[in-house]
Image (spheres, grey):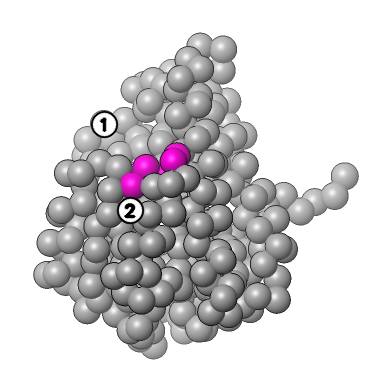
Amino acid sequence: MTIDLTGKVAIVTGGGRGLGRAMTLALTEAGADVVVAGHIPHDLDPIKFDVARQGKGRCHPVLADVRKSDNCERAVGAAIDRFGHLDILVNNAGLGMTLVSPTFTSDPPKFWTVTPDAWRSIMETNANGPFNMARAAAPHMMRRGWGRIVNVTTGIDTMQHRGYSPYGPSKAALEAASYAWAGDLEGTGVTVNVLTPGGPTDTDLLPGRKGDPNRDGTGRTLLSPDVMKAPIVWLASELSDGVSAFRFSGREWDSSLPPTEAAERAARPAGFTERL
């Protein structure tokens, strides 16, 4: 089944590379128009070229630092000014542990060796950034009575992994926030879900050179960023109406199945819902 997103407008933060690039291409290939928000200029021009070459939808790059609320408001405004409205927000921009140590997978750093600046940068990007973006986007979606907020997190084991602080805790904060935001938006037509690749992925968040089969990962075969494509298109569509407060794994998504059946098999409750 082919999902048509023609007429839908999305923002993908960090959409110029890695998981964000894969999701941007998937959305535009399905017909959506996408504002790619990023703070690294040389990431933005290539994605615009790739979309023009491959996609049915349009791409509009916007320089924006998600750590700054005024930048986030500007990105939302750019989507509305350029394409008329906003339907989908994908909070993908993130910083990883290479900011703390380039050898974190083989020699995990202790939390007391992390500099306050590195801690602050990762937490502000990975936890505060999605809040800033969702805060700016949600009122527009609520007025239209339909919208999607998709937050990209990581595995629960990574959130709690020794030596992965502050990356793990920052994603745990976003995971819990996703569940809370879904409750806040209940009944508005706007849903909040989590999407993860489902394991270590061949992106700039890991040490080494992308595409290298001997890349220093975690001892497991690295996933392709393309595992995010099928789930993000389904989450951005009317097929996911009413589905909120779930987490979806790209690795567990079986594209040989009808999309909604694949979603059901790949879904788990978002957040940390077990009561003590």
Q: Looking at the rendering, in which quadrant would you find the C terminus?
A: top right
Which residue type carries mark 2? Ala
Look at the magenta stretch and give its main secondary structure.
loop
Image height of 248 relative to 157, above or below: below
Classed neighbour count for the residue bearing mark 1: other residues with Cα under 10 Å, few (<14), some (14–19), many (≥20): some
Image height of 122 relative to 106, above or below: below
Q: Which residue is drawn at 56% across and 66% down?
A: 139
Q: On the image, numbered disc 2 is attached to which residue?
A: 37
Q: Nearer the viewer, residue 172 or 65?
A: 65
Q: Which of 221 and 250 is in front in this view?
A: 250
- Position in image of residue 141 (x %, y %): 53, 72
- Position in image of residue 59 (x %, y %): 24, 66
Q: Is residue 105 on the magenta stretch? A: no
Furthest toward the right, the residue is: 276
Distance from Cα at disc 2 to Cα at disc 1: 25 Å
Q: Looking at the rendering, in which quadrant would you find the N terminus?
A: bottom left
Q: Which residue is drawn at 24% across and 63% down?
A: 60
